[in-house]
Amino acid sequence: ISSAAKPRSLIGAVFLNLLIENDRAFDILYCITFKLMDRKWLEMHATYMDFNTVIKSTRRQLERELLLEDIQQIEDMPSYSFLAR
């Protein structure tokens, strides 16, 4: 792996491992992110002025999920269940 491809954070390293397991992990995480963001938007009764707050909350939750010990593949993430709906 070139230095440009080396993850610079623990989250990046975890995601790289998920990507090695499933070459669609990026696409799946992208979809999870928007489903989760939509859910948070509705729960928070957000307006466009709350966009940054919703994005930060979404990011924090996804990072927490990626750092869970039992996450071996993208499908193990708790928020993956949002895709089934």
Image: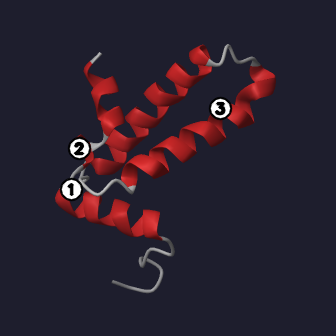
Does residue 55 sit above or below 71 in this rendering?
Answer: above
Residue at left 22%, top 64%?
Answer: 20
**Neighbourhood count class around disc 1 (C-alpha, 10 Å): few under 14, some 14–19, many 20 upward:** some
The label shown at residue 72 is: 1
**Mark 2, residue position:** 76
Do labels 2 and 3 touch, CB within 8 Å? no
Does residue 15 sit above or below 60 in this rendering?
Answer: below
Q: Secondary structure at mark 1?
A: loop
Left/right placement of residue 76 relative to residue 2 reads left
Q: Quadrant of the N terminus?
A: bottom left
Do labels 1 and 2 touch, CB within 8 Å? yes
Does residue 9 sit above or below 62 in this rendering?
Answer: below
Sequence order check, earlier mark of 3 and 1: 3
**Mark 3, residue position:** 54
Q: How far from the left and from the top, in percent, is residue 38?
A: 53, 22
Q: Amino acid at mark 2?
A: Asp
Q: Quadrant of the C terminus?
A: top left
Q: Secondary structure at mark 2?
A: helix
**Neighbourhood count class around disc 2 (C-alpha, 10 Å): few under 14, some 14–19, many 20 upward:** some
Left/right placement of residue 47 relative to residue 22 reads right
Residue at left 70%, top 18%?
Answer: 46
> Outermost residue toward the right?
49
Q: How far from the left and from the top, in percent, is residue 67?
A: 39, 57
